[in-house]
Image (cartoon, grey):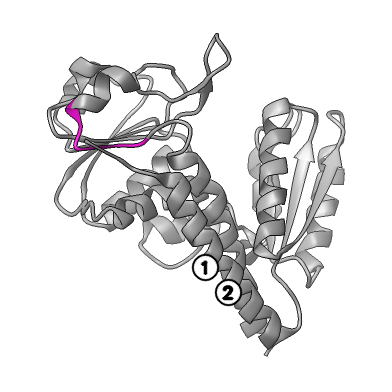
Amino acid sequence: MQILDGKALAQKIEEKVSSGAKEFKSLTGRVPGLAVILVGHDPASQAYVGMKKKACDRAGFYSVTHEMPDDISQDAIIKTIEMMNQNPNIDGILIQLPLPSHIDTTKILEVVAPTKDVDGFHPYNVGRLTTGLDGFVPCTPLGVMELLAEYNIDVKGKNCCVVGASNIVGKPMASLLLNANATVEICHIFTDDLKKHTLAADIILVGAGVINLIKEDMVKEGAAVIDIGINRAPDGRLVGDVDYDAVAPKTSYITPVPGGVGPMTIAMLLSNTLKAAKIHAEEEK
C-alpha cells in the first residue's frame, strides 16, 4: 500500500507555476490575476478563500476578493462579474460556492467569461471537457488526474468507479477518466447496491461528502482508492469519505485526508490561472 502524497506534489506544481509567473511577468510586464467572489460568512468558504489568497501570494499572483453580504442581489453580483470580465488585470474569476439560496448559481456561473472560468464550471468549458477538447477543467478532478500521473497509475482500460455525481467533482471526474480511456461507472445517491459497483472497481474515486461511506468490505484487494471527500467529524477532525484505517491495508494506493486531493485543488487553480493569463496575453498580441 502506497500513500499518494498530494501535499508534496502540490508544492512541486506551485513552484513550477511560480517560475511560470515570473517568466510571464518578464514577457508581459504584469503578473497573473485572480478575483474571488465570496458571498456571505460561511466559515468553510472563508477558510478556503483565505487558503487561495495565500497560495496566490506564494506564486506571485495578483489577487482580489470581493466580499459581499448574504442578502446581496443577484444583479449586483452579475455587475461585479461583468466588471471583472472587462478588467485586463484579472485572468481568472472564481465564484466561491455555495451561494445563498436566493441566488441562481447556474446563471451566475454563466456570466463568467469562458476564458476567465478557471474553475471550469461554465457550460462552454463543460462541453469542451466532455468532447475531449482543450479548455478549463474543474480543479479537484484535474488535481486527481495529476496525482494519478505522478504515481504512474495508468487508468487506460481500468474499471473506475466514481462515487458522487456532482457538477463540481463527479461528472468532470468521469469525463476526464473517459477521455483517458478508462471504463467508467458513476454511482450516486439513487444507485442500488453501491457495494456491488465498488467491489468490481480497480480504482474507486469517491466525493460524496459522507463520512466512512466506503468501508473495508466494499473494496477489492489491490484496488486504488482516491478519497475526494472532506468532512468535519464530530470530534473536530477533518476526514474523508473512506474508512481509512480499515480500507488502507487492502489497497495498492490510497489518498489520505487531509493531505491527499485537497492541496491539489489549490495547485490546479494556480495552474489554470497561469494558463488563462497566457491565453489573454496571446489575444492581446
Quarter containing the N terminus: top left
Q: Looking at the picture, how far across and down is residue 23, in whole percent? A: 62, 81
Name which residue lies at 65% across and 37% down. 97
Name which residue lies at 50% across and 28% down. 230
Name the quadrant containing residue 216. top left
Q: Looking at the picture, how far across and down is residue 32, in whole percent? A: 69, 69
Residue that label 2 marks: 20
Front-lying residue, 256 or 121? 256
Specify the segment rendered in magenta: 250-255
Residue 183 lies left or right of residue 151; in this view the side is left
How many residues crowd mark 1 within 10 Å: few (<14), some (14–19), many (20+)?
Answer: few
Q: Which mark is residue 277?
A: none
Note whether 86 is above or below 36 in the view shown. Answer: below
Front-lying residue, 235 or 139? 235
Q: Amino acid at mark 2?
A: Gly
* Total numbered labels: 2
Note whether 281 is above or below 199 in the view shown. Answer: below
Residue 125 lies left or right of residue 18; in this view the side is left
Circles 2, 1 touching at the beta carbon (< 8 Å): yes
Residue that label 1 marks: 16
Note whether 137 is above or below 21 in the view shown. Answer: above
